[in-house]
């Protein structure tokens, strides 16, 4: 693991995407050399250009698909990676229900190809982007890593299957160092306003939806239910700033240097906020009114979901620092500067 301590080269799969691009900024700022592998199926190379602008550093961008074994063999053949941060994947819950095979193929088969290439080239340090969706609809809050898994849609099941594959692999070959990070609700944008979340279609997630309403791209927010057993009746989630999230990955890399094996950590703030609280926070940050309409609950939504981040606090020496106000301010800066996202 001396390669990591010496700021070795890191492969970031999905590095052109929302979280991966912020990760690249943090890695370059921390002194790592970075290669991104991304097929741009849900992103644009503009995000790579933005990463290089805000860091004043360069990275190597490879526009290939994770499932292309030949491309992976060439990449791993010409570079010696100290670790892989694996963000690449499809993430839309609704789409995963409409086309489960595409999700299993992209997420599970893509990960298998990656693990095969890593094995063949003796790269055995991996950080995997998992999700709180692996917990399904848990009975007890806050959610600890010991809460029973029970994903309720194909997207969540791809994450859960990958976690199991990783556990099997690590059990077979103890040389593997694997960190599974279960993200709660990543939001926020880089402080510069030059990097942020840029959904291809109408956003499914609350924060980018609110931001597009505030900037005038969408007419109003539909709030999915106000009759949940929560303080104001709307759904409660653990929103975490993307900068805190990527700091969690740097902490996981440091942890893996000292701890071979497989570790699972929740990355969340430990605090829940309702939809109405998020709307008000965004109105305060933007000075805009967000027209809202209460509609029926969205199928498959939990009333509340928030992390117990104690294990990550203790073992990774990491904790989320940014509050909801800062999350909204940063999203608004990005949205105002890029009302149509990167493509404009
Ligand atoms: P994103 O869609 O912005 O980024 C994913 C990137 O992976 C995209 O740039 C896409 O082009 C690329 N990609 C997808 N399939 C690929 C393939 N077969 N080969 C190469 N590249 C491929 O998503 P994000 O929000 O940045 O999420 C990153 C990871 O974190 C994903 O694995 C996602 O499931 C996970 N995650 C995200 C959230 C969230 O709310 N954003 C929550 C929990 C977990
Ligand atoms: N939500 C909403 N309207 C939207 C999108 C989301 O009311 O247009 C609510 C949703 O019901 C949930 C919360 O906002 O209570 C967060 O939803 P998101 O899809 O962002 O995250 P997830 O439900 O996957 O945790």
Image: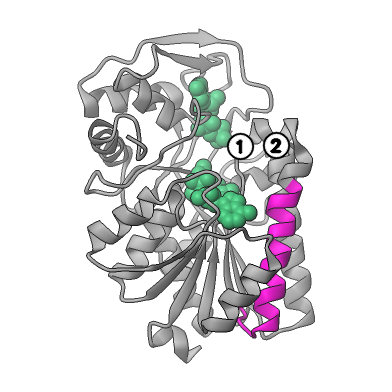
- Residue 32 spot, x, y in % from top left: 36, 76
Task: Say few, some or many: other residues with alpha carbon within 10 Å of mark 2 (under 14 / 14 to 19 / 20 or more).
Answer: many
Q: Label 1 CB, ligand 1: below 8 Å?
A: no
Cβ atoms under marks 1 and 2 closer than 8 Å? yes
- Residue 78 spot, x, y in % from top left: 54, 82
Specify whether residue 130 is in view.
no
User: What are the residue bounds of the magenta stretch?
Assistant: 104-125
Depth check: 116 or 325 in front? 116
**Residue 190 is covered by the magenta coloring:** no
Say the numbered circle drawn on residue 92.
Answer: 1
- Which colour assignment does the render follow? one colour
Disc 1 is placed on an element classified as: loop
Badge 2 is on which residue? Answer: 96
Asked if 35 appears above or below 48 in the picture, the reply is below
- Residue 317 spot, x, y in % from top left: 41, 69
Residue plotted at (46% across, 74% down): 10
Q: In the displayed structure, does residue 136 sit left or right of residue 273?
A: right
Depth check: 217 or 320 in front? 217
Say the numbered circle drawn on residue 4.
Answer: none
Q: How many badges with numbers are in the image?
A: 2
Depth check: 143 or 170 in front? 170
Residue plotted at (77% across, 39% down): 100
Q: CA distance from mark 1 to mark 2?
A: 6 Å
Residue plotted at (27% across, 38% down): 334
Q: In the displayed structure, does residue 323 sit left or right of residue 274?
A: left
Task: Say few, some or many: other residues with alpha carbon within 10 Å of mark 1 (under 14 / 14 to 19 / 20 or more).
Answer: some
């Amino acid at each position: 693991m001396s390669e990591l301590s010496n700021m070795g080269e890191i492969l970031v799969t999905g590095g052109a995407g929302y979280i991966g691009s912020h990760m690249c900024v943090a890695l370059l700022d921390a002194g790592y050399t970075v290669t991104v592998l991304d097929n741009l199926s849900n992103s644009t190379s503009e995000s790579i250009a933005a990463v290089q602008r805000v860091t004043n550093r360069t990275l190597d961008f490879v526009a290939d698909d994770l499932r292309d074994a030949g491309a992976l063999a060439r990449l791993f053949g010409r570079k010696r990676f100290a670790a892989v941060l694996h963000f690449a994947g499809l993430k839309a819950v609704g789409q995963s229900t409409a086309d489960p095979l595409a999700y299993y193929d992209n997420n599970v088969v893509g990960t298998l190809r990656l693990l095969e290439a890593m094995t063949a080239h003796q790269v055995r340090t991996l950080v995997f982007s998992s999700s709180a969706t692996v917990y399904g609809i848990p009975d007890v809050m806050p959610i600890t890593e010991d809460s029973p898994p029970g994903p309720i849609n194909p997207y969540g099941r791809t994450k859960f299957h990958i976690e199991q594959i990783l556990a099997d692999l690590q059990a077979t070959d103890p040389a593997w160092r694997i960190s599974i990070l279960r993200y709660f609700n990543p939001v926020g944008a880089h402080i510069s306003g030059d990097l942020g979340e840029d959904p291809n279609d109408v956003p499914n997630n609350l924060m980018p939806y609110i931001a597009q309403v505030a900037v005038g791209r969408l007419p109003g927010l539909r709030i999915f239910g106000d009759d949940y057993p929560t303080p104001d009746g709307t759904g409660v989630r653990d929103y975490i700033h993307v900068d805190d999230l990527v700091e969690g990955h740097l902490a996981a890399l440091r942890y893996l240097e000292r701890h071979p094996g497989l570790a699972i950590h929740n990355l969340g703030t430990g605090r829940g906020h309702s939809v109405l609280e998020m709307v008000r926070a965004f109105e305060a940050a933007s000075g805009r009114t967000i027209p809202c309409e209460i509609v029926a609950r969205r199928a498959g939504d939990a009333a509340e979901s928030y992390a117990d981040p104690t294990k990550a606090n203790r073992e990774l020496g990491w904790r989320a620092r940014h509050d909801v106000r800062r999350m909204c301010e940063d999203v608004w800066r990005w949205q105002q500067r890029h009302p149509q996202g990167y493509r404009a």
